[in-house]
Image: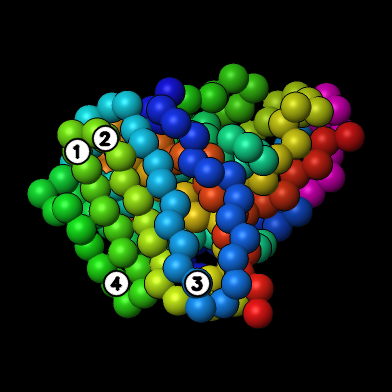
Amino acid sequence: EAAVTQSPRSKVAVTGGKVTLSCHQTNNHDYMYWYRQDTGHGLRLIHYSYVADSTEKGDIPDGYKASRPSQENFSLILELASLSQTAVYFCASSPTGGENTLYFGAGTRLSVL
Amino acid sequence: SQWGEENLQALSIQEGEDVTMNCSYKTYTTVVHWYRQDSGRGPALIILIRSNEREKRSGRLRATLDTSSQSSSLSITAAQCEDTAVYFCATGQGGRALIFGTGTTVSVSP
């Protein structure tokens, strides 16, 4: 049973449109993360959260917002989607931050046209 | 960037061969993670080595860590077709989140 579930699994969006990616975890973990994967860049941290109703910027936050309404749910929001945001997005959770093991969802493939 | 030398991008081997991939890092860390990503899935931890360990084994996997050179390696012994995947190393940066390398694609053919 998947403990980190992402939806949708894939999405096609238009440039300038709003996109919301959702993540739900049943691990009872405090920390949740959004990473972006591009060929040749590995995984890069966009936003993370360690408590409900609070989010923190990662390494590449520009153009993205995050929302953590509850311990279980963490969303990534692209207010004005751009071509450069075409990528695969992964949500992950961990019991604590720093060097703790991450548990990933299956990813969302986003294509912005 | 957390990383110095990039991971080797791709390795192609045949079943039964051994394979080793390396990564180096710039910032002090107390632990190096190695994750495996199968096609269409998210990464999953396969082995973790701490700074007080020079070597760690798990089945056919062997990880090493050299804190003096700030480098780590992952070896797979007698690779099998099901070992085909992308392998990432990752380190922490003091209370925030793991930083991932660019990954090594390993392709194992029969």
Residue A69 appears left or right of A87 = left
Q: Position of residue B94 (x, y in %)?
A: 24, 32
Residue nearer the viewer, A78 or A46: A46
Numbered mark located on residue B67 in the image: 1
Numbered mark located on residue A43 in the image: none
Extent of the magenta region: A11-17
Do tag 4 and tag 1 residues touch (Cβ < 8 Å)?
A: no
**Disc with the residue nearer the chain's start (4 vs 3):** 3
Q: Residue at x 36, y 74 (%)?
A: B60
Task: Please name the amino acid that badge 3 sits on.
Answer: Glu
Q: Is residue B69 above or below residue B54?
A: above
Q: Closer to the camera: disc 4 or disc 3?
A: 3
Residue at which label 4 appears? B58
The secondary structure type at the circle numbered 4 is strand
Q: Position of residue B80 (x, y in %)?
A: 53, 78
Q: CA distance from mark 2 to mark 3?
A: 27 Å
Residue A15, picture quadrant: top right
Task: Check the image and name the residue furthest to the left.
Answer: B52
Q: CA distance from mark 4 to mark 3?
A: 17 Å
Task: Please name the amino acid that badge 4 sits on.
Answer: Ser
